[in-house]
Image (cartoon, rainbow, N blue to C red):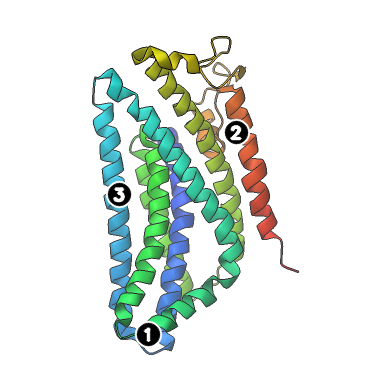
């Protein structure tokens, strides 16, 4: 695989991790600022412990999920082979649900995020075990963003090591943005950053819808080869098992395994062969989740 293809495969996870990581960095930065105002800097170690615990738990979840898929891929049993596309489809659907919820919810809650975190820190400081309260707040924030990223990475399992490299680069960029904002005092238009990243995230997740449907179709086809009773799920008159008729075939014009088709595939969900249900799912996602997202961007009356 060429350098261009490697960078292209790493780009989506870089963008996802940059956005998710910067959101976690904002929480950490706000908590540290609150502790400084309250002259409770002795609790800083609980903040960094919470960051470490959240990152560690996210990595552990990723290792388990990746290890499970790798073990399944290494099996030569036909029954086990069905699990790989089925699990990848499940991870994709879960990632779609989590990232969509985060996209819509975070856009709505962004205006009050700072106030809510400050209230939670103030409440924790009034308790006897204030350190544990700060630790829990930070760990949950980091783990939430990390879990969403891990799900997206797992859904990209077949892409190899490139998504992982992109995730590491995105996390590094998020940390740098957090340091620039809170330590160096550099002004960053946070609202515009999240709006732009939200639009990018919207089309990336729409591409996950296409991948999830492809894996569901593959899982049913493989199940039909092992368990004949599954064959009744397939439409013999269509071009695919459950995806319906083929909408286009651009494999000779713009293949999705080489640049620039690979870039379009990873960022926008493009496929050189796409079927009716995939096209409907893609457009339906953009119309519903995209509509909710842009509605949340409108200023309140």
How far across and how far down the image is residue 200, in percent?
A: 57, 47
Residue at x-position 41% and y-position 50%: 149
Q: Which mark, by number, is residue 281?
A: 2
Q: Quadrant of the N terminus?
A: top left
Q: Is residue 11 left or right of residue 274?
A: left
Which quadrant of the figure has residue 179?
Answer: bottom left
Looking at the rendered structure, the secondary structure element under dot 3 is helix
Does the residue at mark 1 contact the one at mark 2 (Cβ under 8 Å)?
A: no
Say which residue label 1 marks.
125
Earlier in the chain: of badge 1 and badge 2, it is: 1
Looking at the rendered structure, the secondary structure element under dot 2 is helix
* In the foreground, 230 or 270: 230
How far across and how far down the image is residue 54, in percent?
A: 32, 61
* In the foreground, 228 or 60: 228
Say which residue label 3 marks.
61
Q: Which mark, by number, is residue 70?
A: none
> 10 Å neighbourhood of mark 1: few (<14), some, or many (≥20)?
some
């Amino acid at each position: 695989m060429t350098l261009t293809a490697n960078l292209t495969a790493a780009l989506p996870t870089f963008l996802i991790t940059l956005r998710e990581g910067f959101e976690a960095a904002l929480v950490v930065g706000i908590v540290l600022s609150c502790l400084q105002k309250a002259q409770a800097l002795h609790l800083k170690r609980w903040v960094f412990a919470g960051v470490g615990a959240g990152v560690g738990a996210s990595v552990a979840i990723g290792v388990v999920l990746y290890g499970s898929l790798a073990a399944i891929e290494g099996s030569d049993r036909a029954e086990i082979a069905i699990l790989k596309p089925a699990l990848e489809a499940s991870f994709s659907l879960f990632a779609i649900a989590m990232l969509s919820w985060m996209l819509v919810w975070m856009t709505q809650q962004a205006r009050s995020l700072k106030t809510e975190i400050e209230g939670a820190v103030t409440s924790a400081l009034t308790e006897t075990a204030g350190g544990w309260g700060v630790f829990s707040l930070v760990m949950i924030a980091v783990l939430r963003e990390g879990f969403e990223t891990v799900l997206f990475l797992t859904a990209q399992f077949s892409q190899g090591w490139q998504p992982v490299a992109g995730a590491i680069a995105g996390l590094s960029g998020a940390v740098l943005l957090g340091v620039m904002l809170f330590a160096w005092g550099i002004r960053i238009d946070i609202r515009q950053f999240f709006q732009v990243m939200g639009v990018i995230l919207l089309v990336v997740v729409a591409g996950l819808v296409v991948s999830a449907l492809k894996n569901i179709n593959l899982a049913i086809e493989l199940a039909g080869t092992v368990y004949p009773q599954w064959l009744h799920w397939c439409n013999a008159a269509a071009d695919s098992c459950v995806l319906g008729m083929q909408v286009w075939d651009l494999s000779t014009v713009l293949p999705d395994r080489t640049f620039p088709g690979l870039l379009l595939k990873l960022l926008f969900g493009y496929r050189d062969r796409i079927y009716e249900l995939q096209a409907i799912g893609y457009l339906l996602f953009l119309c519903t989740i995209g509509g909710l997202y842009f509605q949340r961007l409108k200023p309140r009356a």
